[in-house]
């Protein structure tokens, strides 16, 4: 009897009961083991039945899986001839060009590591990331070369390889591109070479394939830096292959040859894992869009008619306002994934009603994850969705809800810190053991758990709900705590509100604490002053006094991060000294 009671108590916890498994065929037991392969080996072996099918599409240039593998070998020879060997790091200050995607696998073939850096960063930050990972080879976009040129004499730097977005364009498009964009002149420096010349330098067949090694690094990416200085995430072959495996078997109802619109930057974990490796593992045709901007999203859907999409809610909303999309049959869309920002119930209803009326079979599938777990940890799939939920854990991942900053798990239904365990967890933060130990903790049972810093709960069916970030919690002078999303959800329902962020501002009436300020982006036809006043009055009427915004202000456009999330850090900086009185 005692044992039965103990079992009942234990099974009340998400990490042990794992209620999400009932949604998977055979409880997820038939998911194959993660292959003991590098990401190069995984793509090579998986593509053998589709070698003559298209793998990448780049503004008119189509690259088959056969050509993809040929160029991987070509680049591997070129990097080897340049002196790159197993364990070396090549830094990419670039975007999702074919050369960049192919280089990821070429370097992985020989056991080297690709480190990705956002080309929009300033000169010193780029240099510091290159130095931090001890990279002596740099591949840079031509437009970013002026940020590299000042430190060409950096000790240890052997080569800078410069890419032009025109290199893989069809010849007619190449002429047009070069006519519209000024071609830079490279300095007379033996360290600098064009990529189109570099790829011809390899000694054929000189690259030796590195055998699979457990827990070996395959890529470095930088975190978003929303809570401080960006950190370097060390991703492994197992992590990337595990995410791909989850999507292949339970994430998407998909077949080889279907198309995927990749608008994610390759310098993010999501861009590498979901935009590149997952899609090629599923043998999709991937449309590479390296110069994406939100305003282009409707045009890209209209032009390419992709079967599968991953985007943030704000991008999907743009489709509902586009005249051409409003007249389209969208039944070619087989799946729409979303993450990054939460959707209000009203936004969820609005978007899914629009897409259903335009022929899309399944609702938008919300997902949740972070760079440190190789992108997605939970996702919705097909009809396995629940409003305001971010889906269920992937078959190889375990999610638990814990008392914040502890190893004490909370029962199903209770709110606490979202923690994640499984093979997708990163190896470490590069050269930062303290930050690694703060994020990844070994619990008493011996499992590695990522403590996400996000607050949420799981329901009895295994659906995860996210409330907000612990570090974004707003604490008033009287100790009352609230999450920005609590106010954002209310305001985003108001007429004319396109977007809303709630940020903390200093309490000017007390010696301590902060107050929530609501920053709204409004439709162009709205009168900002009158609308903000109306929103404030509404909040005052429906919210308790301690949970109301101290003021509502309009911003012409709320800035977005590189992956399409609302840039909370920038907005906080803009309004940190705001006087609400």
Image (spheres, grey):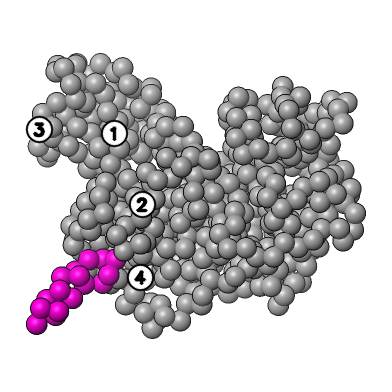
- Between disc 2 and disc 4, the foreground one is 2
- Residue at 22%, 55% (x, y): give it: 408
Residue 160 x, y percent position in the rendering: 77, 35
Q: Secondary structure at mark 1?
A: strand
- The residue wearing badge 3 is 545
- Residue at 89%, 48% (x, y): give it: 201
Q: Secondary structure at mark 4?
A: loop
Q: Secondary structure at mark 3?
A: helix
Residue 416 x, y percent position in the rendering: 23, 52
Is 120 left or right of 463, judged from the image as shown? right
Work out whether 239 lies above or below 172.
Answer: below
Residue 236 x, y percent position in the rendering: 56, 57
Q: Nearer the viewer, residue 337 or 510?
A: 510
- Between disc 3 and disc 2, the foreground one is 2
Crowding at dot 3, Cα within 10 Å, few <14 / some 14-19 / many 20+, comes out as few
- The residue wearing badge 4 is 384
Q: Quadrant of residue 379?
A: bottom left
Badge 2 or badge 1: first in the primary sequence: 2
Badge 2 or badge 4: first in the primary sequence: 4
- Residue at 30%, 37% (x, y): give it: 471
Q: Nearer the viewer, residue 144 or 8?
A: 8
Marks 2/4: CA–CA distance: 31 Å
- The residue wearing badge 2 is 441
| Magenta region | 1-17
Residue 244 visible at all? yes
């Amino acid at each position: 009897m005692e044992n039965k009671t103990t079992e009942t108590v234990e099974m009340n916890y998400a990490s042990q009961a794992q209620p999400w498994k009932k949604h998977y065929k055979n409880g997820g037991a038939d998911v194959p083991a993660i292959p003991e392969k590098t990401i190069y080996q995984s793509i090579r072996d998986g593509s053998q039945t589709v070698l003559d099918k298209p793998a990448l599409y780049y503004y008119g240039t189509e690259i088959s899986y056969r050509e993809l593998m040929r160029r991987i070998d070509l680049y591997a020879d070129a990097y080897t001839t340049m002196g790159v060997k197993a364990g070396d790091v090549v830094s990419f200050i670039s975007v999702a060009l074919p050369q960049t995607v192919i280089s990821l696998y070429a370097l992985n073939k020989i056991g080297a590591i690709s480190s990705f850096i956002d080309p929009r960063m300033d000169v010193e930050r780029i240099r510091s990331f290159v130095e931090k990972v001890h990279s002596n080879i740099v591949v840079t976009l031509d437009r970013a070369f002026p940020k590299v040129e000042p430190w060409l004499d950096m000790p240890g730097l052997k080569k800078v390889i410069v890419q032009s977005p025109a290199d893989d364009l069809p010849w007619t498009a190449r002429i047009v591109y070069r006519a519209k964009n000024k071609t830079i002149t490279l300095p007379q420096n033996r360290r600098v070479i064009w990529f189109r010349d570099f790829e011809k330098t390899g000694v054929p067949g000189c690259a030796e394939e590195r055998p699979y090694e457990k827990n070996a690094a395959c890529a470095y990416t930088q975190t978003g830096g929303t809570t401080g200085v960006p950190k370097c995430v060390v991703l492994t072959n197992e992590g990337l292959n595990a995410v791909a495996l989850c999507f292949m078997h339970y994430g998407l109802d998909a077949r080889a040859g279907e198309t995927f619109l990749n608008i994610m930057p390759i310098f993010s974990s999501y861009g590498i894992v979901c935009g590149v490796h997952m899609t090629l593992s599923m043998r999709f045709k991937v449309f590479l869009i390296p110069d994406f901007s939100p305003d282009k999203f409707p045009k890209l859907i209209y032009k390419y008619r992709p079967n599968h999409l991953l985007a943030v809610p704000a991008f999907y909303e743009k489709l509902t306002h586009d005249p051409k999309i409003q007249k389209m049959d969208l039944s070619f869309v087989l799946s729409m994934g979303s993450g990054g920002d939460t959707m209000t119930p009203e936004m969820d209803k609005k978007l899914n009603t629009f897409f259903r009326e335009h022929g899309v079979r399944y609702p938008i599938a919300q997902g949740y994850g972070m760079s440190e777990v190789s992108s997605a940890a939970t996702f919705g799939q097909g009809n396995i969705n629940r409003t305001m939920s971010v889906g269920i854990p992937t078959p190889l991942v375990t999610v638990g809800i814990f008392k914040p900053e502890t190893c004490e798990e909370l029962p199903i239904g209770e709110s606490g810190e979202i923690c994640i365990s499984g093979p997708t967890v990163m190896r470490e933060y590069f050269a930062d053991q303290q930050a690694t130990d703060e994020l990844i903790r070994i619990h008493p049972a011996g499992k590695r758990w990522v403590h996400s810093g996000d607050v949420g709960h799981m329901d009895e069916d295994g659906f995860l709900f996210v409330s907000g970030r612990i570090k974004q919690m707003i604490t008033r002078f009287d100790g009352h705590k609230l999450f920005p999303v609590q106010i954002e959800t209310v305001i985003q329902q108001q007429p004319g509100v396109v977007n809303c962020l709630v940020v903390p501002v200093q309490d000017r009436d007390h010696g301590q604490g902060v107050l929530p300020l609501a920053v709204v982006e409004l439709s162009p036809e709205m009168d900002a002053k009158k609308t903000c006043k109306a929103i404030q009055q509404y909040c005052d009427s429906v919210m308790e006094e301690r949970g109301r915004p101290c003021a509502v202000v309009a911003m012409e456009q709320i800035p977005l991060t590189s992956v399409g999330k609302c840039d909370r850090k920038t907005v906080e900086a803009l309004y940190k000294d705001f006087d609400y009185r």
